Image (spheres, coloured by chain):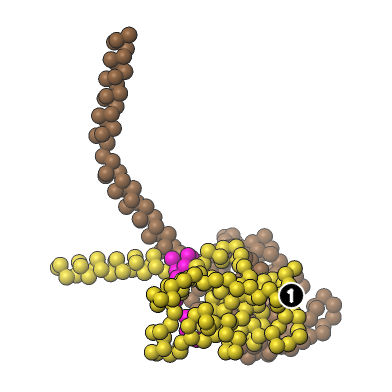
Amino acid sequence: MSTAGSRIASFLGGAAARFGKVPWREIREEAFDRAVLVLKAACFVHVVNTYVVGIAFVRGPSMLPTINLTGDVVAVERVSPRWGSLAVGDVVILLSPENPRKTVAKRVLGLEGDAVTFLIDPARGSASQTVVVPGGHVWVQGDNIYSSRDSRQFGPVPYGLIQGRAFCKVWPPEAVGLIGQKL
Amino acid sequence: MGKWSTMWLFTKKSVTGALIGLTISDRYGFIVPVTGSSMHPTFSACDARFPGYLKADVVLVEKFCLEKYKFSHGDVITFKSPTDHKQNFVKRLIALPGDWVQVPESSEILKIPEGHCWVEGDNAACSLDSRSFGFVPLGLIQGRVTHVIWPPQRISQVERKKAIERISPH
Protein backbone atom coordinates (compact mmCIF):
# COMPACT_ATOMS: atom_id res chain seq x y z
CA MET A 1 0.00 0.00 0.00
CA SER A 2 1.36 3.37 -0.80
CA THR A 3 1.10 4.83 2.71
CA ALA A 4 2.96 1.84 4.24
CA GLY A 5 5.60 2.09 1.52
CA SER A 6 6.04 5.84 2.02
CA ARG A 7 6.26 5.38 5.82
CA ILE A 8 9.05 2.79 5.42
CA ALA A 9 10.85 5.07 2.98
CA SER A 10 10.66 8.07 5.31
CA PHE A 11 11.79 5.90 8.28
CA LEU A 12 14.84 4.69 6.36
CA GLY A 13 15.61 8.22 5.17
CA GLY A 14 15.42 9.50 8.75
CA ALA A 15 17.67 6.69 9.98
CA ALA A 16 20.25 7.50 7.31
CA ALA A 17 20.22 11.17 8.32
CA ARG A 18 20.70 10.30 12.02
CA PHE A 19 23.54 7.92 11.05
CA GLY A 20 25.26 10.78 9.25
CA LYS A 21 24.89 13.06 12.28
CA VAL A 22 26.69 10.67 14.73
CA PRO A 23 30.14 12.19 15.44
CA TRP A 24 32.15 9.29 14.00
CA ARG A 25 35.43 11.15 13.86
CA GLU A 26 35.28 12.13 17.52
CA ILE A 27 34.38 8.58 18.51
CA ARG A 28 37.26 7.20 16.45
CA GLU A 29 39.74 9.65 17.95
CA GLU A 30 38.60 8.98 21.49
CA ALA A 31 38.76 5.22 20.98
CA PHE A 32 42.28 5.58 19.60
CA ASP A 33 43.38 7.74 22.53
CA ARG A 34 41.97 5.25 25.02
CA ALA A 35 43.74 2.35 23.25
CA VAL A 36 47.06 4.23 23.32
CA LEU A 37 46.58 4.91 27.03
CA VAL A 38 45.94 1.23 27.74
CA LEU A 39 49.04 0.33 25.72
CA LYS A 40 51.19 2.79 27.69
CA ALA A 41 49.85 1.45 30.98
CA ALA A 42 50.60 -2.13 29.92
CA CYS A 43 54.17 -1.18 28.98
CA PHE A 44 54.60 0.56 32.34
CA VAL A 45 53.36 -2.51 34.20
CA HIS A 46 55.70 -4.74 32.21
CA VAL A 47 58.75 -2.54 32.89
CA VAL A 48 58.03 -2.34 36.62
CA ASN A 49 57.43 -6.08 36.81
CA THR A 50 60.64 -6.93 34.96
CA TYR A 51 63.07 -4.41 36.37
CA VAL A 52 61.81 -3.36 39.80
CA VAL A 53 59.46 -5.65 41.67
CA GLY A 54 56.86 -8.26 40.83
CA ILE A 55 54.78 -10.89 42.55
CA ALA A 56 54.85 -14.64 42.20
CA PHE A 57 52.72 -17.51 43.45
CA VAL A 58 54.94 -20.17 45.00
CA ARG A 59 53.70 -23.58 46.05
CA GLY A 60 55.03 -27.05 46.71
CA PRO A 61 56.76 -28.82 49.57
CA SER A 62 60.36 -27.95 48.78
CA MET A 63 60.53 -24.69 50.74
CA LEU A 64 58.67 -25.78 53.90
CA PRO A 65 58.44 -24.28 56.49
CA THR A 66 59.36 -20.96 54.90
CA ILE A 67 56.72 -21.18 52.17
CA ASN A 68 53.44 -23.02 52.56
CA LEU A 69 52.59 -26.27 50.80
CA THR A 70 49.37 -24.92 49.32
CA GLY A 71 51.01 -21.74 48.16
CA ASP A 72 51.97 -18.25 49.22
CA VAL A 73 52.12 -15.11 47.13
CA VAL A 74 55.54 -13.50 47.45
CA ALA A 75 56.95 -10.16 46.37
CA VAL A 76 59.99 -10.64 44.15
CA GLU A 77 62.50 -7.87 43.65
CA ARG A 78 64.44 -7.86 40.37
CA VAL A 79 67.21 -5.43 41.25
CA SER A 80 69.57 -7.68 43.28
CA PRO A 81 70.22 -10.33 40.61
CA ARG A 82 70.90 -7.68 37.96
CA TRP A 83 73.31 -5.85 40.24
CA GLY A 84 74.95 -9.07 41.33
CA SER A 85 74.20 -8.34 44.99
CA LEU A 86 72.70 -11.71 45.86
CA ALA A 87 73.93 -13.16 49.15
CA VAL A 88 74.01 -16.63 50.65
CA GLY A 89 70.69 -17.24 52.41
CA ASP A 90 68.52 -15.34 49.90
CA VAL A 91 65.41 -17.05 48.58
CA VAL A 92 65.48 -16.70 44.80
CA ILE A 93 63.01 -17.40 42.01
CA LEU A 94 64.70 -19.08 39.06
CA LEU A 95 63.89 -20.94 35.85
CA SER A 96 64.29 -24.65 36.42
CA PRO A 97 67.33 -26.09 34.60
CA GLU A 98 65.25 -29.19 33.90
CA ASN A 99 62.34 -27.33 32.31
CA PRO A 100 62.65 -23.68 31.27
CA ARG A 101 58.88 -23.21 31.39
CA LYS A 102 58.81 -23.92 35.13
CA THR A 103 59.83 -21.35 37.74
CA VAL A 104 60.97 -22.62 41.12
CA ALA A 105 61.84 -20.97 44.42
CA LYS A 106 64.93 -22.10 46.29
CA ARG A 107 67.44 -20.70 48.77
CA VAL A 108 70.98 -19.77 47.71
CA LEU A 109 73.48 -21.75 49.75
CA GLY A 110 76.64 -20.98 47.80
CA LEU A 111 77.91 -18.35 45.37
CA GLU A 112 80.70 -18.84 42.84
CA GLY A 113 83.88 -20.02 44.47
CA ASP A 114 82.18 -21.20 47.69
CA ALA A 115 82.63 -24.77 48.91
CA VAL A 116 79.21 -26.23 49.69
CA THR A 117 78.78 -29.30 51.88
CA PHE A 118 75.49 -31.15 51.60
CA LEU A 119 73.88 -34.42 52.64
CA ILE A 120 73.62 -36.69 49.63
CA ASP A 121 70.47 -38.45 50.82
CA PRO A 122 69.20 -37.13 54.16
CA ALA A 123 66.56 -39.85 54.48
CA ARG A 124 69.22 -42.57 54.40
CA GLY A 125 72.14 -41.81 56.64
CA SER A 126 74.39 -38.79 56.87
CA ALA A 127 76.89 -39.24 54.04
CA SER A 128 77.87 -35.79 52.82
CA GLN A 129 79.74 -34.36 49.89
CA THR A 130 81.56 -31.07 49.30
CA VAL A 131 81.41 -29.25 45.98
CA VAL A 132 83.10 -26.02 44.87
CA VAL A 133 80.68 -23.82 42.96
CA PRO A 134 82.14 -22.94 39.53
CA GLY A 135 82.38 -19.36 38.23
CA GLY A 136 79.10 -17.79 37.13
CA HIS A 137 76.98 -20.38 39.00
CA VAL A 138 75.12 -20.59 42.30
CA TRP A 139 74.17 -23.53 44.50
CA VAL A 140 70.49 -23.62 45.46
CA GLN A 141 68.65 -25.89 47.86
CA GLY A 142 65.11 -26.06 49.12
CA ASP A 143 64.59 -25.53 52.86
CA ASN A 144 62.84 -28.91 53.04
CA ILE A 145 65.80 -31.11 52.04
CA TYR A 146 63.73 -34.29 52.25
CA SER A 147 61.38 -33.23 49.47
CA SER A 148 63.17 -30.89 47.12
CA ARG A 149 64.75 -31.20 43.68
CA ASP A 150 67.58 -28.74 43.73
CA SER A 151 71.33 -28.42 43.13
CA ARG A 152 71.89 -31.73 44.89
CA GLN A 153 70.21 -33.35 41.88
CA PHE A 154 70.82 -30.96 38.98
CA GLY A 155 74.07 -29.36 40.06
CA PRO A 156 74.98 -25.69 40.40
CA VAL A 157 72.79 -23.39 38.30
CA PRO A 158 74.07 -20.60 36.05
CA TYR A 159 73.44 -17.16 37.53
CA GLY A 160 71.55 -16.14 34.37
CA LEU A 161 68.61 -18.40 35.29
CA ILE A 162 67.77 -16.36 38.40
CA GLN A 163 64.72 -14.17 37.86
CA GLY A 164 64.49 -12.34 41.19
CA ARG A 165 64.82 -12.44 44.97
CA ALA A 166 61.73 -13.21 47.06
CA PHE A 167 61.95 -10.87 50.00
CA CYS A 168 58.46 -10.71 51.45
CA LYS A 169 55.27 -12.75 51.65
CA VAL A 170 52.15 -10.77 50.80
CA TRP A 171 49.32 -13.36 50.88
CA PRO A 172 47.62 -15.03 52.76
CA PRO A 173 47.30 -12.26 55.34
CA GLU A 174 48.28 -14.45 58.29
CA ALA A 175 51.60 -15.26 56.59
CA VAL A 176 52.59 -11.70 55.69
CA GLY A 177 56.17 -10.91 56.65
CA LEU A 178 59.70 -10.62 55.41
CA ILE A 179 61.44 -13.82 54.32
CA GLY A 180 64.46 -14.30 56.54
CA GLN A 181 67.99 -15.00 55.45
CA LYS A 182 68.42 -18.43 57.06
CA LEU A 183 66.22 -21.38 57.76
CA MET B 1 57.13 29.55 30.59
CA GLY B 2 57.23 28.10 27.09
CA LYS B 3 60.69 26.56 27.54
CA TRP B 4 59.73 24.47 30.59
CA SER B 5 56.53 23.22 29.04
CA THR B 6 58.31 22.07 25.85
CA MET B 7 60.99 20.40 27.93
CA TRP B 8 58.32 18.69 30.04
CA LEU B 9 56.56 17.53 26.90
CA PHE B 10 59.84 16.24 25.51
CA THR B 11 60.58 14.36 28.74
CA LYS B 12 57.11 12.80 28.81
CA LYS B 13 57.43 11.67 25.20
CA SER B 14 60.88 10.18 25.68
CA VAL B 15 59.86 8.31 28.84
CA THR B 16 56.85 6.87 27.00
CA GLY B 17 59.05 5.94 24.07
CA ALA B 18 61.57 4.27 26.38
CA LEU B 19 58.84 2.27 28.12
CA ILE B 20 57.39 1.08 24.84
CA GLY B 21 60.85 0.30 23.44
CA LEU B 22 61.84 -1.67 26.54
CA THR B 23 58.63 -3.69 26.44
CA ILE B 24 59.04 -4.54 22.77
CA SER B 25 62.69 -5.53 23.18
CA ASP B 26 61.84 -7.71 26.20
CA ARG B 27 58.87 -9.53 24.75
CA TYR B 28 58.90 -9.49 20.96
CA GLY B 29 62.27 -8.80 19.38
CA PHE B 30 65.27 -6.55 19.30
CA ILE B 31 68.16 -5.50 17.11
CA VAL B 32 71.74 -6.08 18.14
CA PRO B 33 75.22 -6.02 16.56
CA VAL B 34 77.14 -9.30 16.58
CA THR B 35 80.83 -9.11 17.51
CA GLY B 36 83.50 -11.78 17.59
CA SER B 37 84.52 -14.32 14.98
CA SER B 38 82.92 -17.51 16.27
CA MET B 39 80.03 -17.44 13.76
CA HIS B 40 82.04 -16.70 10.62
CA PRO B 41 80.91 -16.79 7.78
CA THR B 42 77.28 -16.52 8.90
CA PHE B 43 78.12 -13.22 10.63
CA SER B 44 81.24 -11.34 9.57
CA ALA B 45 84.12 -11.56 11.99
CA CYS B 46 84.84 -8.35 13.81
CA ASP B 47 86.57 -7.05 16.89
CA ALA B 48 84.54 -6.53 20.04
CA ARG B 49 86.33 -3.30 20.89
CA PHE B 50 85.99 0.10 19.26
CA PRO B 51 86.29 0.73 16.30
CA GLY B 52 85.84 -2.87 15.11
CA TYR B 53 82.41 -2.67 16.71
CA LEU B 54 81.25 -0.34 13.94
CA LYS B 55 81.81 -2.95 11.21
CA ALA B 56 79.70 -5.56 12.97
CA ASP B 57 76.71 -7.21 11.34
CA VAL B 58 73.46 -6.04 12.91
CA VAL B 59 70.86 -8.78 13.34
CA LEU B 60 67.20 -9.07 14.23
CA VAL B 61 66.46 -11.34 17.20
CA GLU B 62 62.93 -12.57 17.80
CA LYS B 63 61.57 -13.65 21.17
CA PHE B 64 58.37 -15.40 20.13
CA CYS B 65 60.18 -18.73 20.31
CA LEU B 66 60.58 -18.27 24.09
CA GLU B 67 56.88 -18.66 24.75
CA LYS B 68 56.94 -22.43 24.41
CA TYR B 69 60.72 -22.90 24.10
CA LYS B 70 60.23 -24.53 20.72
CA PHE B 71 63.43 -24.53 18.71
CA SER B 72 64.58 -26.39 15.62
CA HIS B 73 67.91 -28.01 14.96
CA GLY B 74 70.22 -25.52 13.29
CA ASP B 75 68.62 -22.34 14.68
CA VAL B 76 71.01 -19.54 15.56
CA ILE B 77 70.20 -18.43 19.09
CA THR B 78 71.43 -15.84 21.52
CA PHE B 79 71.83 -16.82 25.18
CA LYS B 80 73.40 -15.62 28.43
CA SER B 81 76.80 -17.14 28.97
CA PRO B 82 76.72 -19.89 31.65
CA THR B 83 79.96 -18.56 33.08
CA ASP B 84 79.11 -14.84 33.07
CA HIS B 85 75.47 -13.77 33.15
CA LYS B 86 76.29 -10.28 31.88
CA GLN B 87 77.62 -11.57 28.53
CA ASN B 88 75.44 -12.70 25.66
CA PHE B 89 76.64 -15.29 23.17
CA VAL B 90 75.40 -16.03 19.66
CA LYS B 91 75.80 -19.64 18.55
CA ARG B 92 74.03 -22.29 16.53
CA LEU B 93 71.78 -24.85 18.22
CA ILE B 94 73.12 -28.27 17.27
CA ALA B 95 71.13 -30.62 19.49
CA LEU B 96 67.95 -30.43 21.57
CA PRO B 97 66.93 -32.25 24.80
CA GLY B 98 66.86 -36.01 24.38
CA ASP B 99 69.16 -36.08 21.33
CA TRP B 100 72.45 -37.91 21.25
CA VAL B 101 75.34 -35.76 19.98
CA GLN B 102 78.82 -36.75 18.99
CA VAL B 103 81.37 -34.35 20.45
CA PRO B 104 83.61 -33.19 17.57
CA GLU B 105 87.26 -34.34 17.56
CA SER B 106 86.42 -37.04 20.05
CA SER B 107 84.60 -40.34 20.11
CA GLU B 108 82.34 -39.32 22.98
CA ILE B 109 78.61 -39.59 22.43
CA LEU B 110 76.58 -37.59 24.95
CA LYS B 111 72.88 -37.52 25.63
CA ILE B 112 71.43 -34.03 26.02
CA PRO B 113 69.67 -33.91 29.42
CA GLU B 114 66.13 -32.52 29.83
CA GLY B 115 65.93 -28.75 29.64
CA HIS B 116 69.40 -28.32 28.08
CA CYS B 117 70.88 -28.00 24.60
CA TRP B 118 74.19 -28.23 22.75
CA VAL B 119 75.47 -25.15 20.91
CA GLU B 120 78.42 -24.63 18.62
CA GLY B 121 79.79 -21.72 16.64
CA ASP B 122 80.04 -22.03 12.84
CA ASN B 123 83.74 -21.13 12.97
CA ALA B 124 84.86 -24.13 15.01
CA ALA B 125 88.46 -22.99 15.22
CA CYS B 126 87.77 -19.91 17.36
CA SER B 127 84.50 -20.53 19.12
CA LEU B 128 83.88 -20.85 22.84
CA ASP B 129 80.84 -23.10 22.95
CA SER B 130 79.42 -26.32 24.37
CA ARG B 131 82.71 -28.07 23.63
CA SER B 132 84.15 -25.98 26.49
CA PHE B 133 81.27 -25.14 28.81
CA GLY B 134 79.01 -28.15 28.26
CA PHE B 135 75.24 -28.24 28.01
CA VAL B 136 73.43 -24.91 28.09
CA PRO B 137 70.13 -24.75 30.06
CA LEU B 138 67.31 -23.63 27.74
CA GLY B 139 66.33 -21.00 30.33
CA LEU B 140 69.41 -18.97 29.41
CA ILE B 141 68.27 -18.48 25.83
CA GLN B 142 67.30 -14.87 25.05
CA GLY B 143 66.05 -15.20 21.48
CA ARG B 144 66.45 -16.57 17.98
CA VAL B 145 68.36 -14.71 15.27
CA THR B 146 66.24 -14.51 12.14
CA HIS B 147 67.74 -11.90 9.81
CA VAL B 148 70.85 -9.87 9.19
CA ILE B 149 69.67 -6.30 8.62
CA TRP B 150 72.94 -4.33 8.28
CA PRO B 151 75.16 -3.70 6.31
CA PRO B 152 72.86 -3.43 3.27
CA GLN B 153 74.91 -5.78 1.10
CA ARG B 154 74.53 -8.54 3.70
CA ILE B 155 70.79 -8.25 4.33
CA SER B 156 69.46 -11.81 4.32
CA GLN B 157 67.61 -14.40 6.31
CA VAL B 158 69.74 -16.52 8.63
CA GLU B 159 69.39 -20.12 7.49
CA ARG B 160 69.14 -23.28 9.56
CA LYS B 161 72.10 -25.59 9.11
CA LYS B 162 71.54 -29.01 10.59
CA ALA B 163 74.48 -31.21 11.50
CA ILE B 164 72.68 -34.43 10.60
CA GLU B 165 75.83 -36.50 10.44
CA ARG B 166 76.58 -35.85 14.09
CA ILE B 167 73.32 -36.06 15.93
CA SER B 168 70.71 -38.71 16.28
CA PRO B 169 67.32 -37.57 17.55
CA HIS B 170 65.36 -39.59 20.07
Q: Residue A86's x, y, as percent? A: 55, 81
Q: Relative to B144, is B135 above or below?
A: below
The answer to which of A8 and A164 lies nearer the viewer is A8
Q: Quadrant of the N terminus of chain B?
A: bottom left
The answer to which of A15 and A121 lies nearer the viewer is A15
Left or right of A23? Residue B87 is: right
Q: Quadrant of the C terminus of chain B?
A: bottom right
Q: Relative to B63, is B54 above or below?
A: below
Q: Relative to A19, is B169 above or below?
A: below
Magenta-colored stretch includes residue B33 = yes
Q: Residue A107's x, y, as percent? A: 64, 76
Magenta-colored stretch includes residue A62 = no
The answer to which of A16 and A125 lies nearer the viewer is A16
Q: Provide the secondary structure element on which disc 1 rests.
A: strand
Residue occupying image coordinates x 55% and y 71%: B159
Q: Residue B16's x, y, as percent? A: 34, 65
Report whether residue A88 is seen: no
Task: Say which chain is yellow.
Answer: B
Residue at the outermost left position: B1
Q: Quadrant of residue B51?
A: bottom left
Q: Quadrant of residue A168?
A: bottom right
Span highlighted in magenta in the image: B23-36
Chain A: give its colour.
brown
Residue on which the image places disc 1: B100
Left or right of A13? Residue B105 is: right
Residue at the outermost top position: A1
Residue occupying image coordinates x 82% and y 75%: A123
What is the chain identity of the residue bearing mark 1? Answer: B
Residue occupying image coordinates x 26% and y 25%: A14
